[in-house]
Image (tube, rainbow, N blue to C red):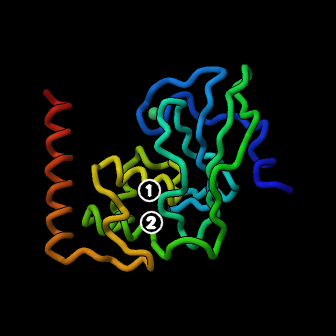
Amino acid sequence: MDITDNVEGTEIPADHCAWCQEPLEVGDTVTMYASDTDHNPKAPHEDFGIERVYGADCCRRLEIDLPSVNAVEALFAAQIDPSWEAYDVHLIDKSTTGEGIEWSPPSMITLVTGMEFETFMDDPSLDHVRLSPGMIYDLILGWDIDPKSIIDEDGKVVMSEDEIRQMQADLQERIDRQYEEMET
Ligand SMILES: [Zn+2]
């Protein structure tokens, strides 16, 4: 069975682009990221599932950016049919277990935020989120931090302790500012 057979005809689990939040529409060509790995400790999904859907005008995904050695990950192009299912599915990129970089997505969260992963996951808004390597990659990138600048090709952290402290302080400042903006 081809890996695309897992995806052809499945429901598209989003109506907005996961990156820019633009609404998706019937007939759109989308890019979809799927993985078999969910780092959410509360109720991890165990299936190979589509997790991130990117809109037609958001072509920043042409490959799996930071494939995790412990996960199966795939990127597909597909069209949205009128019943909101994926058709004309094509594989763009794939990384199976044993391929990719030895990085731990939960450890990267800890490194970037300075919080234990369990503490970070206390946030109720994350209760049912599928936390695949690709989701965590996007989350960190959404904080204006490039995960690829943190580790090298062997998954080794390349930042100094000072740089890590600075990164954590900058992120905390950005989050505090966002909260302030939300309150005013
Ligand atoms: Zn987008």
Residue under the image location 65 percent in, 34 percent down:
12
Amino acid type of disc 2?
Pro
Asked which quadrant contains residue 140, the reply is bottom left
Residue picked out by circle 1: 136
Image x and y of residue 40, in percent: 51, 59
Image x and y of residue 177, in percent: 14, 41
Asked if residue 14 lies left or right of residue 136, the reply is right
Quarter of the figure that contains the N terminus: bottom right
Q: Is residue 76 above or below residue 137?
A: above
Q: Is residue 72 above or below residue 124?
A: below
Asked if residue 59 lies left or right of residue 120, the reply is right
State how many labels appear.
2
Residue under the image location 58 percent in, 58 percent down:
44
Residue toward you, 76 or 164? 76
Residue picked out by circle 2: 105
Image x and y of residue 176, in percent: 16, 45
Asked which quadrant contains residue 53, the reply is top right
Image x and y of residue 149, in percent: 31, 65
For residue 126, the mark is none
> Which mark sits nearer the N-terminus, 2 or 1?
2
Amino acid type of disc 1?
Ile
Residue under the image location 30 percent in, 69 percent down:
111
Q: Secondary structure at mark 2?
A: helix
Q: Is mark 1 within 8 Å of ligand 1?
A: no
Dot 2 alpha-carbon crowd within 10 angstroms: few under 14, some 14 to 19, many 20 or more? many
Asked if residue 136 lies left or right of residue 98, the reply is left
Asked which quadrant contains residue 182, the reply is top left
Q: Is residue 174 above or below residue 16?
A: below
The residue positioned farthest toward the right in the image shown: 1
Q: Secondary structure at mark 1?
A: helix
Q: Report whether residue 128 is seen.
A: no
